[in-house]
Amino acid sequence: MKAKNCLIFGGSGQIGRNLIRKLTKNNYRVTVVTRNIHQKSYIIKTQANAGYIDIVESNIFDEKKIRELFKKADICINLIGILFEKKRGSTFKNIHSIFPSLLAKLSKEFNLKHFIHLSALGINEAKDSEYAKSKLEGEKNVLTNFPLATILRPSLVFSVDDQLTTHFMTILNRLPIFPLYYEGKTKFAPIHCSDLTDTIHHVISRNIYSKIIECVGPEIITFKTLLEKLLLLIGKKRILIPFPLKIAEFSASLFEILPNPLLTRDQLRLLKYDNIPSGKYKTNAEIGVPSVRFFDQEVKKYCYMWREGGQFSTEKYITKDFEKNEVNKI
């Protein structure tokens, strides 16, 4: 069987690298577009055997160069997204709305078999967030220009390469207190990166055109519970303090000055809304790919990097209940 050609945008991130490995092992050829081949190619090229992966350097808005790539593609996958805006064109509108629209138009023009677009869960409710509004606009643009596209809306995505658990464990390891926004009651359905890429592969290989699929993990946990789980895993005791909204907004406005802010005011607004299945769309389980990787079990595999003594540290603090991986029912 002839290998299908997948054109991937955003292949150097945690989802992209995992997806490249998944697809190439299943006889797909992959072309990865990166804006800086010197910084990213040494990571990307190790994700697949030679002959299965090509790396192309291009500005994502260089339509002339991107158009050439679509001539050889069967499937286009867009994984590009940002959590906060930067200068030089990295705005929510450009990245989440305009760019997906361009890819959808080219997918239609070159008659691609499929276009997969990664969006985010919970954006329908977060009407006061610029991030959410740009994601919704991008989804609308994609489905308008390529009606056969499939949009995936994942909850929090975690893995050893993420910017979520690793980020929080670093902060919890260093600070004696940690703020709880909205009293830590916001609910999430964290999905492991491998479960998400299993879903993408399933959508492609089974030719599923379900428009919008909500991608969630096997459990629902609150923000406070998530932090408590991480503290247990790294063997730390920290004070979790509910932050008044005004103070949280002020601190977020200060963080925004940093090149990579810990929290922005827009992200703070997003935290008001639960990040769990809405019931309006199919989930990954309902299309035949239930998540099987639990938060505790997966983070336990790499949390030793934040423990005293590293991988040689004792695990006496891990309780029997934790070992049984009892799911928090909220």
Image (cartoon, helix red, strand yellow):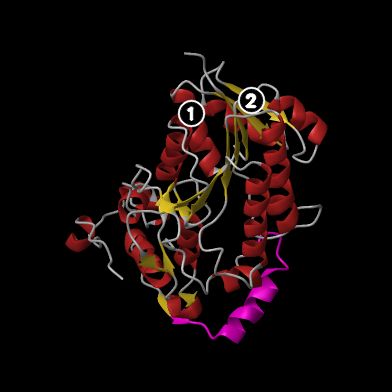
Q: Local crowd at mark 2 within 10 Å, few (<14), some, or many (≥20)?
A: many
x 51%, y 23%: residue: 28
Q: Which mark is residue 23?
A: 1
259 inside magenta stretch: yes
Q: Nearer the viewer, residue 255 or 315?
A: 255
Q: Classify residue 257 as left or right of residue 225.
A: right
In the displayed structure image, the side of residue 74 where residue 26 appears, left or right: left
Task: Give me the C-alpha separation between circle 2 and circle 1.
Answer: 14 Å
- On the image, the x and y values in percent for residue 51 come to 57, 15
Q: Is residue 253 magenta?
A: yes
Work out which residue is located at the far top of the displayed protein and give it.
Answer: 1
Residue at (67%, 34%) from the top-left corner? Answer: 107
The residue indicated by pointer 2 is: 73
What segment carries the magenta color? Answer: 241-261
- Residue 210 x/y as whole percent: 48, 45
The kind of residue tagged 2 is Ala
